[in-house]
Amino acid sequence: MIKATCLIINVGAGVQSARALNSLFGSRAGVRMVNQVDDFLRGTDGSLDVGRLWRRFTSAAQRFLESEAGSVPAPRRGSLPRVRNYFDATQLSDEAVDVAIAKSIRRKSGARGTSSGQIPASADQVEFMLQKMTAWRRNVHAANPHLASLPANVKGTIIHSFVSKRMRGLDVAGLRVNERLNSPFLAPGTSQHISAATGVPYTYRIPDFRLQATTLDIKPQGTSLTGAQVDDFMSFGNTSDVRFINYYPF
Amino acid sequence: MLSPAEVLKMLVGLKEVNDLDVINDDAVLAASCTESDKATVRSMAAIIEEVYDSFDYEASPEFLAKLEGKSEQVQTMHRKLLDQTKRRDAVRRLGEAITQLLSSNDAFNLVNIEQHHRLIALKELAESIGRV
């Protein structure tokens, strides 16, 4: 009787330990062991064979300890590795930061990516992206004393180049970057304006961006939205939707 | 067209704002140098990239001169005092020194001796701009 009581006490402690281990490891062996001990305590089969149950229990406990605790030693308190569960931006490269800013601008525009990687966007969304990127880069360049000291045309070309590069990286569906806009009507000489370089009427123009019928061009603030270039944009592109992306000269 | 000193300023400025790759865009070079100088400017950009990437103020002649003749403890202290702010400041000074490479040798004092051949090549390339 005393032996049986001690056994039950020990087994009760075993259940607690097994449950604790089971909650720790969540293993099948742990579950089996707990069930066997439960069966033993409840005596559900009516013919209690303590020896058989004890053997099954100890065997399951041993398997459990070997398979689980043996292969995966319980970590000692205080020795757990520190897990970084936050985003550490200090490790980002300058390029990664620029890519992240460009993506943020794209997301803010409302344009959403597709599974193919291309981004379908409206003309308004593209205009928003161009405005933000141009302003961002204009400010970065203006704050750099070396770049700020360069002639205006060089600074403007650098901004164009940067924005073109980033827009290409965003892969907006149907967006044409720095592509020739040829006259759809006639061969050379369809423009009413004479090229200063060739001395003959323009045969093509190169707008910074084109999305379907919309032409977008980066210009310094104050540039008039009229003139030979705009006329040709409208005439060659057969559209009246020409938009300037302005930046403040520096 | 830009003068050699302005080309150096442009390249250093572009490197500082992480836009040095726009030099691959022909439009940028067309606005800043003659056709015959385009290859030279691209070579200069490559050298500047290398100088920046290999820059380590701790290995500079200026810093090493500070340590010369000092005890190991003092040397360790100098290295410990070289925090991120001072390192960033050294990079900023490097940019300034490269833009003045044609008139000053400050850059040689900041760049590791093993990298001096790059500075010499950069100076020669800059001096050749505009010479046809």
Image (spheres, rainbow, N blue to C red):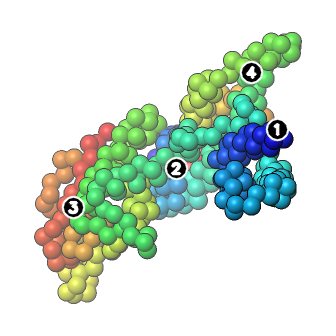
Residue A167 in sight in this render: yes
Within-10-Å neighbours for mark 4: few <14, some 14–19, many 20+? few
Which residue: 69% across, 62% down? Answer: A45
Q: Where A125 falls versus A96 (above or below)? A: below
Distance Cα–Cα, label 2 vs label 3: 26 Å
Q: Amino acid at mark 2?
A: Ala
The reply, left or right, for residue B128 in relation to residue A176 is right
Pick the residue in front: B5 or A207.
A207
Q: Which residue is mark 4?
A: B79
- Chain letter behind tag 2: A
Q: Amino acid at mark 1?
A: Ile
Pick the residue in front: A38 or A147.
A38
Q: Secondary structure at mark 1?
A: helix
- Chain letter behind tag 1: A
Q: Which residue is mark 1?
A: A2
Residue A202: give its label. none
Estimate the x, y position of residue A114 in percent, counting from the top left: 39, 70
Q: Are marks 2 and 4 in contact (CB under 8 Å)?
A: no
Residue A157 in sight in this render: no
Distance Cα–Cα, label 4 vs label 3: 54 Å
Q: Secondary structure at mark 4?
A: helix
Point out the residue furthest to the front here.
A1
Pick the residue in front: B104 or A14.
A14
Q: Which residue is mark 3?
A: A124
Q: Amino acid at mark 3?
A: Asp
Which residue: 66% across, 59% down? Answer: A44
The earlier-in-sequence mark between 1 and 2 is 1
Q: Residue A127 is drawn in which quadrant?
A: bottom left
Within-10-Å neighbours for mark 3: few <14, some 14–19, many 20+? few
Residue A96: give its label. 2
